[in-house]
Structure formats: C-alpha cells, structure tokens
Amino acid sequence: MTDGIFIAIISLLNTFILLKIFQSLFLSKGIKDRINKRSSHKVIATRSGGVSIIISIFIISTVYYLFNSTIYDFSLLIPMLLLGLIGLYDDVYNLDFKLKFIFQIIAAKIIIDSGLIIDNFHGLFGIYEINRASAQILTIFIICSIINSINFIDGIDGLAASIVIFFISSFEFFSKYDAELNYLSIMIICSLIPFLFYNFRKNKKIFLGDSGSLFLGGLISIYVLKILSNDYLIKSEFDVNKILFVISILSYPIIDFTRVILIRLKNGNSPFIADSNHIHHILLKKFKSHYKVLLIINLSMLFLLLIIQYIF
C-alpha cells in the first residue's frame, strides 16, 4: 500500500513537470499541432503529452529496476517503448501508415513471445482452446486492432485518456485478486490526470499525439491479453464470460473503430486515412462541448458494462 501511494504521488508530480518541460521544448523547436478542417481546436497545441507520460513511466520503472524491486514485468516496456518511439517520429515527421502498421505487428509479436497470447475463447460460441498458429494470427490481429482503436479515438479533448482510465479502473475493480499490473495501473492513471489538466486548457494545449495513443493502445492490448489469460480471475459476484467483459469495458473504441473502418472501406477509401466520421466528431457537432461528449460516451460505456454484468 505504501508503494502504491508513493508511486501515485511520484507519477503525478513527475508527469506534471515533464509535460511542462516537453511542451516548452516542442514550442521552442516549432513543433506544433497543425490546425486543419479536422481539428477540434483553434489554439496553439503540441503533441508532447505521449512522450511526457512514457518518460515518466520509464523513469519510475527504471528506479525500481535498479533497486531490484519488480513492481511489474519490466520486459513489457520493450514493445511499448517501440510503439512510443514510432509514434513520436510520426508526430514530428509524419510517418507512412504502412510503416507504422509494420512496427505494430513487430510489437505484437514481441508481446506474444513474452507469453501473452489468445489461445482460448473461454466457451464463447462453444469454442475453447485453439491451435498455436491460429492463436498467434488472432492475437496479432487483436493487438493491432486495439492499438489503432485507441489511436482512432484520440480526436477530441480527454477522450482517449478518459477511456483508458475507465478501462484500467474496471480491470482492477473486477479482478478477484490483486493483479500483477496494479502498480503499472497506478502509474498510468496518475500520469493521465495531469495530462488531462493540460489537455483541457484554453491555450497552449497538450495532446497525446501518436506517441501517446500508440503507447496506451499497446498497454491496453496487454491488459486485454491478461484478462483472457488463466491468471486473471473476475470476482465471483460478477460471473461473466471474459470476452464479453473485455467488450463491455472497451466498448466505445471497438464500436467506433469497427464502424469507421467499414464506412471507409464502403466508400473505397483506405481504412487508415483520417476523417471526421467518428462518433465523437458527430456528437461534438451536435452538442458543441467536449465535456458533454465525454460524459455521454463514458456513461454509455458504464451502462453497457452494467447490462453485460447483470444480464449475461
């Protein structure tokens, strides 16, 4: 418990300071978010949030590693850092989406080789264990889909961060035992809180950027694989199929990602070329408020979670 409080405080302070430092650095180098017809802002902003959060988590993890205190499996940082670096390069130099996708596959394979793989459907549709080859292909597909779904929803203030907080909080709350990722969960949530402060500012805003969305998307995919593993047990009073549980706490990214991909393919467009057809863009046009859209989406996710928990 003491470690948890210490990590929470350090994560808050560390990230708050790093956000200020990297925003100043980005501004001094003229690295600003371009304002175009898809932008939901009209003020100066930088995509420095992701790199600040990544470095904050990396610093804390490194200190614990040097003192031989394993608060979580530090090897998980390898694919996450790869995704973060690719995202940072894209934020600054605009990387081709095909190359980004290749690196996502590489990161997914590293995660699989660490022992995380979807090889059991836990009885959904009457399916249980599946063979290794099919499991690897399915897992790579799921990881890349989750990474891109988080990347896709990073379109209005606070949306990606609030959904990640919702997902991780649900992961910890419904866990029967203290999950092995609980310290990492504290770091992520407490790093996102100061980010939200800068993200909602009226001027000199800070966005996650691709570095943040790809990094967080990779982390969420790891949490999903943990849920679907035999190590994660849902509390007995919430007896529900694990796959339905994942769908319920990740519902908005799944629905929006699937919807947008299908629309783009139907219109003959690349599924990776950005547009303003996301559900949050439609809601923003209607309600004219980022706060209202966040409230609607998060309450909808909570409602679906309750339905799945108590009906299924």
Image (tube, rainbow, N blue to C red):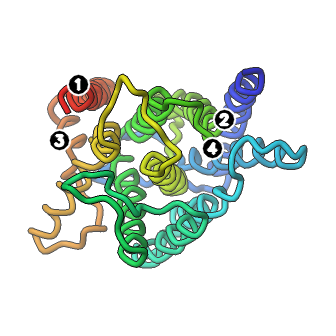
- Residue at 52% x, 60% y is 116
Secondary structure type for disc 4: helix
Looking at the rendered structure, the kind of residue marked 3 is Ile
Q: Seen in the image, is 24 located left or right of residue 262?
A: right
Q: Are marks 3 and 1 in contact (CB under 8 Å)?
A: no
Nearer to the camera, 99 or 90 = 99
From the top left corner, tell me how far across and down residue 31 is, in percent. 58, 56
Label 3's element?
helix
61 up-or-down from 115: above or below: above
Residue 145 numbered mark, or none:
none
Q: Which mark is residue 310?
A: 1
Depth check, mark 2 against mark 4: the one in front is: 2
Q: Nearer the viewer, mark 2 or mark 3?
A: 2
Question: Neighbour class for label 3 at 10 Å: few (<14), some, many (≥20)?
Answer: few
CA–CA distance between discs 4 and 1?
A: 36 Å
3 or 1: tag closer to the N-terminus: 3
Question: Which dot marks residue 183?
Answer: 2
Residue under label 3: 282
Q: Which mark is residue 53?
A: 4
Identify the mark nearer the N-term, 2 or 4.
Answer: 4
The amino acid type, in three-letter code, at marker 1 is Tyr
Corner quadrant of residue 285 = top left
The residues tagged by marks 3 and 1 sit, at their Cα atoms, a distance apart of 30 Å
* Sequence-wise first label, 2 or 3: 2
Q: What is the secondary structure assignment of the residue under circle 1?
A: helix
Which residue is pictured at 53% across the width and 27% down the height?
A: 197
Q: Amino acid at mark 4?
A: Ile
- Which image quadrant is residue 29 in? bottom right
Mark 2 vs mark 1, CA separation in Å: 29 Å
Q: Position of residue 163 (x, y in %)?
A: 39, 36
